[in-house]
Image (tube, helix red, strand yellow):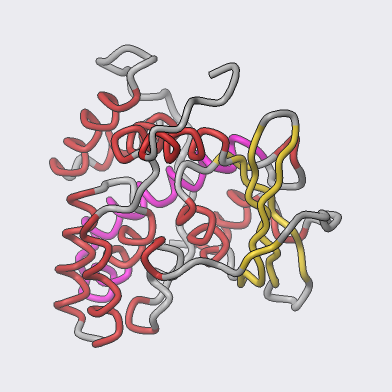
Amino acid sequence: MNAMLRLAILSGGLLLLSCAPVGVATREPGPASSGRTLAASPAAKMNPPAAVPEGAPLTPAVPASDDAAYYRQMVHVLEAKDLAAAKAIDFARFRHGSMLLRHGGGPAAEKDLRPALTSGDVAAIRRAASALVAEDAAHIGAHIILMNIDQDAGHTTDAELHDAFIAGMFHSMFASGDGRGYTTAIRAYFIREEYDLVRALGGQVQRQSLGHQDGKSYDILQVKTKSGATRDIYFDITELFAEEGKLFGLPAPKGK
């Protein structure tokens, strides 16, 4: 499995892009409860995901406007361990549906993963990551952990299934934009996706900024690349902001 080569194709050299700094207020990356540091432990090393082969998209059995229902339908593909069907999922709809069901919040099972990672107990890590995927099948970090554990254990079929979900979700992120600036920002439905993507590409987040332009909201991550260079990567979090606002009874942004 030449995953590194496929990742290079998938990423399109994102972290080599030169992006101008933005003049917005900055904040440090959030706490572990946000899901931003999952899979960072040596006990759960992160191998780069493979790219999903191109093919005809899975014909949805739910209306195109109902991504929450689409997400629920596609969870059964994971439960059935149907690799071929997994590679045909529309992962943009899948991720969006997960966000709509959770209003952008993290799953409850997330709190159990950090202690497991700290303990280094592989069995405990597997249980915690499995519970997390069972609660939120769009959780990239948990899929990465399970993929690596299954690879190490020789469970090739299970590893390939998780790899298909990881690659599919990352691919759908890159399909929305290249991250160079506001107009080509990568659409993120969870903050954790931003950090999972940067880690998978071998980068390290130095700082997180919030920007606004033309009625939209953006996360700008200042990333240190493997070469030591620093780049800004832009993520469109407009829909995520709107969903999180619903938790507090805030009105939807104009035009929504």
The quadrant holding residue 68 is top left
The residue most toward the top is 63
Which residue is depicted at the point 40% across and 52% down?
A: 166
Residue 125 in picture, x, y percent from top left: 22, 74
Above or below 8: residue 63: above
Residue 63 in picture, x, y percent from top left: 32, 12
The residue most toward the bottom is 119
Choose between 51 and 104: the one closer to the eye. Answer: 104
Residue 9 in picture, x, y percent from top left: 62, 50
Which residue is depicted at the point 19% across and 70% down?
A: 126
The quadrant holding residue 182 is top right
Q: Is residue 163 magenta?
A: yes
Which residue is depicted at the point 45% across and 58% down?
A: 49
Q: Which residues are magenta?
A: 148-177
Choose between 226 and 71: the one closer to the eye. Answer: 71
Above or below 62: residue 116: below
Left/right of residue 232 with respect to residue 246 in the rendered view: right
Choose between 194 and 213: the one closer to the eye. Answer: 213
Which residue is depicted at the point 21% across and 60% down?
A: 109
Left/right of residue 252 with respect to residue 106 in the rendered view: right
The quadrant holding residue 131 is bottom left
**Labels in figure, total:** 0
Residue 162 in picture, x, y percent from top left: 30, 54
Q: Main secondary structure of the magenta part?
A: helix
Q: Is residue 82 magenta?
A: no
Locate the N terminus by quadrant: bottom left
